[in-house]
Amino acid sequence: MIKNLGRRKLSRTGSHRRALMRNLATALFQHEKITTTFAKAKELSSYSERLITKAKAGDLSAKKAVAGEIKNTEVYKKIFDVLVPRYQGRAGGFTQVFKVGMRKGDAAEEAIIRLIV
């Protein structure tokens, strides 16, 4: 019996999907608000919230885990210097996803994902 458990595949191979999530998360942490398709935004929401939750521990293990996913050093520093103190008293729900409408070129459903302030 086939059960489709887990995440959205987004019509990509596993390595491409992982690279896509890393790049989207880096852009989200850098700009704190990005526009993408709704399916990618929903996946990015859970991915980025897991990264912030790991980073909240603040120990060496957490820093290595986040450094393994976020390759940009400026964004890495921003996570630990700005975002972790901002969300220290919050248990979860660090992102919001808003539907924007349809993209003009291919009618894909777009969404804005942003970090809660």
Image (tube, grey):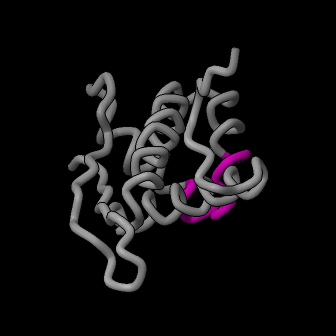
Q: Indicate left or right for 109 with 7 as reference.
A: left
State the image quarter where residue 3 is shown. top right
Residue bounds of the magenta highlight: 67-76
Residue 81: x %, y % from top left: 44, 49
Where 65 sits versus 75, above or below? above
Residue 65: x %, y % from top left: 68, 36
Residue at (35% x, 74% y) in the render? 107
Q: Quadrant of the N terminus?
A: top right
Please name the predominant secondary structure of the magenta segment in the image.
helix
Residue sitting nearer the eye, 2 or 117: 2
Identity of the residue furthest to the bottom in this view: 105
Q: Based on the picture, tell me whether residue 75 belongs to the magenta stretch.
A: yes
Where 8 sits versus 27, above or below? above
Where 39 sits versus 87, above or below? below
Residue sitting nearer the eye, 81 or 98: 98
Residue at (22% x, 68% y) in the render? 101
Residue at (31% x, 44% y) in the render? 95
